[in-house]
Image (spheres, coloured by chain):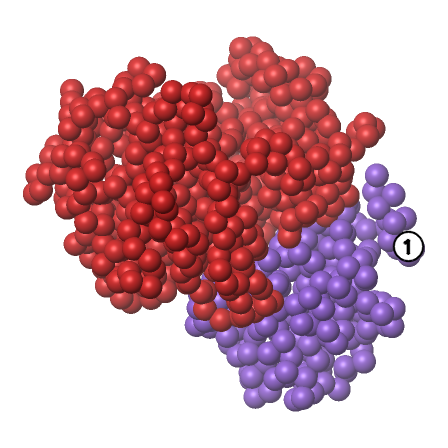
Chain colours: A purple, B red
């Protein structure tokens, strides 16, 4: 069963460390952040190392048909419009086993998110290594140290129980501002609400 | 092996005293489906990241662990009624500082027994009922007496004291479950209609898709957000309800790694069978179709939208309706009330919202009478409803498969002269959407005798919820001046609504919870249809209790700093218990 899944990925992968459950938080694999690269939705390589000179990198987990991610799409587009001109790339990672490059591209296009680079992480090794649990989980990476300086929600607008008219806390925006200011991120970790990613055993 | 067999085997396991075994003896369930075994399938970890969960306690209140983030630390103590060292378990509970819960892995869900146990121990502690026995092992509770400290800031947990090795907790084991025989029937019953491959979140197209979504399926079931409309079956069944066994089957099968078996995958065929044709076959052709005259265009983002649409001219004759379905854009439509007005929408003023008393229902209304309904520490002043009226709302659609679908022979009257109006709440989806809602009505079959279904509400005004208050209880009630038979209830609250109960206080003083919704989800506003119509004799007091959460812990609270009063605005609150009934006593035992 699992073997078939991996074959369906169409690319050879290393054997993942065994997980006690397909839904447990993924065990970390010690791989330097700077080394992660994956094909994008167009097949071109997407790599964190390409952005070594950026003041920060924002990486958001995406999954097709996830209503939380979809409701965040306009916010993500606005964040990208704000950050990309300031030299901060906004990148997405998809590690959902039920998605592939073509359906990811179509889903993003439907929600106005074309043009953002996507790590199509079919073998889930990158997401596992980054310990990403669900979609909309957002990482702010400081390329000077190649460390994750923020992990959590984009803001506090949307939870599983509904959405506020507007966010009252803008976690991502504040974290990036702290990085720009050269100060430690004041809120380095928050709880994010999204669609849990199923990791293959 | 089918559901019947599963239950039979479960029953056999129960009869064999599987959960009563002590001394760590392994139970060998019959090969095959779900069993709650007392020997751990694998060792329970000692620490980990918190995977949030929600459980109902022995008094019927619902607790989502993540909700208590403002407490910082919550302590959980594992318990099993079959443990001979329960006194020692209770002793450990008594030593815990701060917020604490007992977690009872108890497939029997014997709440009264647990209530007696904690009372006997002199403890003020709620016992979380892990009836599926799938939750305890995921937070380090493998034995009675295990003490686990949950850090809700870091969202991690750690076992700080080991329990008693001779008291292993029962634990659902999904290894023996058959995908095709045990799991797919649960999916077909509970999940497929709203998550088929024709829907926006197609989780169940086939086995591979299901596997891809399995982590999310597990999370939503564990947190009791799915299946929606979390009704507490302990107080009696509702139509379209679910059982703890069904949930245990789904979650323990996922936990076991989703064993596939070798049978052909039934899901593609089941998806194909869910077509508009099948619905047409089930419902027949609608007798009346009302549609919006203009399309609503919704933006991608921004605040939720509230709109009205008139869908009929004044009706020329009475309609007798046995069923109503709505055809709509499911993704963007949060809920819809189908309302009857006595004039066109353009002429209606705000006062048609205010539910004035009506001559059509002569249920007695009582003012200022503080009756004997027992108060507890959360009690607020009890007030009789000031107004009782025929409900202007004909039905509510609230993101669930439940709709008006009466037993043959029962029908709602839509009087001549009525104007049908839709009151619509749109929740935006992230992309632009359009909405053009159609109301399909199915008329009573004149060949059958006709019993009129009446609908009413009693509307509590005059409550004030303090800023930041977590459990603000608002109660009201009416005394019935005639025999009625209760069919369905629709408790309506806004974003601070947390739980709702309908309680009967019979003329002899006996109290009975008729429907309990311990975890009210604002985004679902279903009709709760009693599996068995409930006869309520004249003199019965029908009491409703709704609890509101005006704290910052309520993630959709528009303003935790505000005093909140009754009102139609979404920043205000409502205590609007609606119900559908027949006059007279029909069926059941009262």
Say few, some or many: other residues with alpha carbon within 10 Å of mark 1 (under 14 / 14 to 19 / 20 or more): few
Residue beneath the point at 15% across and 25% down: B539
* Residue nearest the observer in this picture, B507 or B10: B507
Tag 1, which chain? A
Answer above or below: position of B432 versus B469: below
Q: Is residue A17 left or right of residue B502?
A: right
Identify residue for label 1.
Answer: A10
Q: Quadrant of residue B388?
A: top left
> What residue is drawn where x is 72% and y is 30%?
B179
Can you say which quadrant of the picture contains the N terminus of chain B?
A: top right
* The C terminus of chain B sits in image quarter: top left
> Residue B220: horizontal and vertical position, in percent?
56, 46
SS of the residue under disc 1: loop
A176 or B520: nearer the viewer: B520
Whole-percent x, y for residue B515 in the image: 35, 33
Question: Residue B383: where, in percent of width, then height?
Answer: 14, 44
Q: In the image as oriented, which residue stretches furthest toward the front?
A: B316
């Amino acid at each position: 069963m699992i073997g078939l899944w991996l074959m369906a990925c169409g690319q050879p992968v290393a054997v993942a460390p065994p997980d006690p459950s397909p839904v447990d938080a993924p065990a970390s694999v010690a791989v330097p952040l700077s080394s992660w690269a994956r094909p994008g939705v167009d097949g071109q390589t997407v790599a964190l190392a390409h952005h070594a000179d950026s003041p920060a990198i924002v990486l958001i987990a995406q999954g097709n048909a996830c209503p939380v991610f979809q409701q965040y799409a306009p916010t993500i587009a606005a964040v990208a419009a704000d950050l990309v001109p300031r030299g901060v790339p906004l990148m997405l990672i998809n590690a959902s086993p039920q998605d592939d490059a073509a359906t990811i591209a179509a889903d993003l296009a439907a929600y106005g998110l074309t043009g953002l680079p996507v790590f199509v992480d079919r073998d889930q090794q990158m997401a596992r290594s980054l310990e990403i649990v669900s979609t909309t989980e957002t990482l702010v990476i400081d390329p000077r140290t190649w460390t994750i300086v923020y992990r959590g929600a984009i803001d506090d607008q949307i939870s599983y129980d509904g959405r506020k008219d507007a966010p009252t806390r803008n976690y991502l925006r504040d974290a990036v501002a702290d990085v720009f200011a050269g100060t430690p991120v004041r809120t380095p970790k928050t709880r994010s609400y999204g669609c849990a990613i199923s990791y293959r055993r | 092996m089918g559901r019947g067999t599963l239950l039979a085997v479960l029953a056999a396991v129960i009869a064999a005293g599987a959960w009563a075994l002590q001394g760590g003896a392994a139970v060998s369930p019959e090969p095959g489906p779900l069993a709650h075994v007392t020997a751990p399938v694998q060792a329970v970890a000692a620490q980990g990241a918190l995977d949030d969960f929600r459980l109902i306690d022995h008094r019927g209140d619902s607790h989502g662990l993540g909700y208590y983030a403002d407490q910082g630390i919550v302590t959980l103590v594992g318990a099993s009624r079959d443990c001979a060292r329960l006194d020692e378990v209770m002793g450990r509970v008594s030593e815990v500082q701060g917020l604490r819960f007992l977690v009872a892995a108890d497939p029997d869900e014997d709440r009264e027994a647990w209530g007696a146990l904690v009372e006997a121990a002199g403890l003020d502690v709620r016992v979380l009922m892990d009836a599926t026995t799938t939750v305890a092992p995921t937070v380090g509770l493998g034995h009675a007496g295990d003490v686990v400290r949950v850090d809700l800031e870091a969202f991690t947990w750690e076992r700080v004291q080991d329990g008693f090795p001779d008291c292993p907790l029962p634990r659902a084991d999904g290894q023996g479950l058959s995908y095709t025989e045990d799991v797919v029937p649960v999916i077909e019953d509970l999940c497929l209609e709203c998550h088929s491959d024709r829907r926006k979140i197609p989780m169940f197209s086939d086995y591979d898709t299901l596997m891809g979504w399995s982590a999310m399926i597990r999370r939503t079931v564990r947190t009791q957000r799915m299946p929606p409309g979390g009704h507490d079956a302990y107080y009696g069944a509702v139509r379209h309800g679910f059982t703890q066994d069904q949930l245990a089957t789904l979650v323990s099968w996922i936990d076991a790694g989703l064993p596939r078996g070798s049978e052909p995958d039934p899901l593609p065929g089941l998806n194909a069978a869910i077509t508009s044709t099948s619905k047409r076959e089930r419902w027949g052709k609608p007798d009346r179709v009302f549609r919006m005259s203009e399309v609503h265009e919704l933006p991608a983002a921004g605040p939720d939208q509230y709109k009205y649409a008139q869908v009929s001219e004044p009706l020329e004759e009475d309609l007798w309706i046995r069923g109503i379905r709505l055809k709509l854009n499911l993704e963007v439509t949060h809920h819809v009330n189908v309302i009857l007005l006595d004039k066109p929408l353009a002429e209606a003023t705000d006062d048609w919202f205010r539910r004035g008393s009506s001559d059509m229902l002569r249920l007695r209304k009582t003012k200022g009478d503080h009756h004997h309904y027992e108060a507890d520490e959360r009690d607020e002043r009890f007030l009789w409803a000031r107004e009782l009226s025929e409900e202007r709302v004909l039905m509510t659609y609230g993101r669930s498969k439940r709709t008006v679908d009466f037993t043959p022979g029962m029908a709602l009257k839509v009087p001549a002269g009525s104007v049908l109006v839709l009151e619509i709440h749109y929740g935006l989806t992230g992309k632009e959407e359009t909405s053009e809602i159609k109301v399909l009505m199915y008329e009573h079959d004149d060949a059958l005798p006709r019993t009129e279904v009446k609908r009413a509400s009693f509307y509590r005004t005059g409550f004030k919820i303090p800023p930041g208050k977590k459990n603000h209880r608002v109660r009201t009630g009416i005394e019935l001046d005639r025999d009625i038979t209760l069919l369905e209830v629709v408790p309506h609250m806004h974003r601070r609504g947390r739980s709702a109960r309908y309680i009967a206080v019979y003329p002899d003083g006996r109290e009975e919870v008729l429907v309990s919704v311990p975890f009210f989800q604002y985004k679902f506003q279903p009709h709760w249809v009693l599996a068995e119509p409930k006869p309520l004799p004249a003199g019965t007091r029908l009491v409703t209790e709704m609890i509101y959460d005006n704290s910052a812990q309520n993630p959709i609270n528009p303003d935790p700093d505000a005093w909140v009063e009754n009102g139609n605005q979404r920043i205000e609150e409502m205590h609007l218990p609606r119900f559908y009934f027949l006059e007279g006593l029909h069926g059941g035992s009262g």
